[in-house]
Amino acid sequence: MSQMLTRRVHPTRTENDAPTRPVGLGLAALTALVVGSMIGSGIFALPSQMAASAAPGPLLIGWGITGVGMLMLAFVFQTLVTRKPDVDGGVYGYARAGFGNYVGFTSAWGYWVSAWVGNVGYLVLLASTLGYWWPSFEGGNTFRAILVASAVLWIVQILALRGVHSATLVNTLVTIAKVVPILTFIAIGVVGFKAGLFSADVWGSSTTIDGGSLGSTLDQVKNMMLVTVWVFIGVEGAAVYSQRAAKRSDVGRATVMGFVGVLALLLAVNLLSYGLMAQAKIAGLEDPSMSGLMKDQVGSWGAGFISIGLLVSLLGALIAWVLLSVEIMRLPARDHVLPKVLAHENEHGAPNVALWLTSFCVQAMLVWTLFNSSTYTDLIYLATSLILLPYLWSAAYQVLLAVRGETYEDAPGRTRDLLIGLVALGYAVWLVYAGGWEYVLVAGLFYLAGTAFYVWARKESRQVVFTAIEKVLVGVVVALSVAAVIGFVQGFVTI
């Protein structure tokens, strides 16, 4: 069984699969893609979410663990881009090369669904943020809010149809713009920081949130780490676009640079907030809580400034994730893992069929939110759960290469990469567990729906649909889906 799981799968492409075009995304564009996809809404809501979970002491421990875990994942993408330059598509390519076509498909499909579901969440929050000025948009799922969100969606669609290079240029400019309000908050936080507030209850022994205690140090660390999952999603952005990079080495550099930069911003925003206001008061702020802190420090103009920054940030994240979502469809379609029509590109080199499919899915779910109580948080948690398995497969692939010694015949670093891969794999497994079983069951439903596309692609190319081990994996997906349906009927799954 292990031999069947670990076989290598080489790309099967032809000259007619896609039009020939120059590739040339540079280091700045790739880094902006990583930063743009990681900085969305999470950092603006971080102060209250963290304050409700942990005191400063456990917070520092949790950030240390999370930082190491995610840094190891960043190193995994950096290493794999260098050691396997022939494998394109990041999380999809590594899963397929290490564990076969169907696992590669699940990685690509899960990533794609995660991307567009996350975009629905971004659009809902974007419309909701307009409620700061116009109350009729409050909540993000009113008729007017959905109408505006839909307009933004199709404007981004038009931009993306103009080609990857045009869209990434806009993303770079927007990424720069959205970092400005965050840096402004950090500067004001440094000036207004009060050490006495920060150290008032370092370990959270006496702080109560909504009448309840924060729990033990271990409980606080675990709770705050659950919050950090979403804010780091996107670290793989440059790896997904590896085929379009001007230099492969830039992909790894962009991944690590983008991650370190975003981690520094997250730490600064989170830690400084504890010195600006009492923890219990921070936990009670409405999202985006950064806005409430700014209002407390400099007045109402600060809240408006952060709200504008959030709108810019959401727009930038939306553009970045639209780009990632269609790229993760294009490459599997060229490898006969998804229907080849999804690899079709227009005269600007944009995967137009994949773009239209993605936007229609987003639009359908936007309309669905009109008649549903699903919130931004629900959508984001679902998007997060779907992207965790692709992370796990990438880390597992690095471990596999190091164990085999593949690509290490005449090069050092095998032991180091094995250790990095094992830490990243352990962290990825923990993230899947921490995400919650309800979301795993719902993810099974999405995988089962996508399997129809996989069968279509395999029959279209006259290739074997499922190997023996892949039939077992499909059985697991079916079982998860059945459990999810039963859960919805009986009420113990409520997503």
Image (cartoon, rainbow, N blue to C red):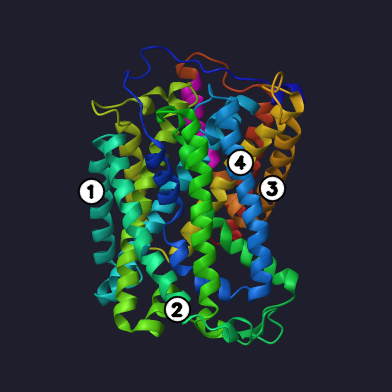
Considering only order in the chain, which callout, 1 or 2, is on the residue closer to the N terminus?
1
Q: Amino acid at mark 3?
A: Val
Q: Is residue 453 magenta?
A: yes
Q: Which residues are magenta?
A: 446-458
Residue 380 lies, with reference to residue 95, above or below; the image says below
Structural crowding at the residue carrying mark 3, measured as other residues with C-alpha within 10 Å and reported as few (<14), some (14–19) or many (≥20):
some
Q: CA distance from mark 2 to mark 3?
A: 40 Å
Q: Quadrant of residue 350?
A: top left
Considering only order in the chain, which callout, 4 or 2, is on the residue closer to the N terminus?
4
Q: Amino acid at mark 2?
A: Val
Secondary structure under the numbered disc 2 in the rendered image:
helix
Per the image, the residue denoted by label 4 is 75
Question: Which one is in front in this view, the residue at disc 1 or the one at disc 4?
Answer: 4
Per the image, the residue denoted by label 1 is 155
Q: Point out residue 22 in the picture as x, y percentages from the top left corner.
A: 32, 23
Considering only order in the chain, which callout, 3 or 1, is on the residue closer to the N terminus?
1
Question: Which one is in front in this view, the residue at disc 2 or the one at disc 3?
Answer: 2
Residue at (44%, 50%) from the top-left corner? 35
Q: Point out residue 460 in the picture as x, y percentages from the top left corner.
A: 45, 18
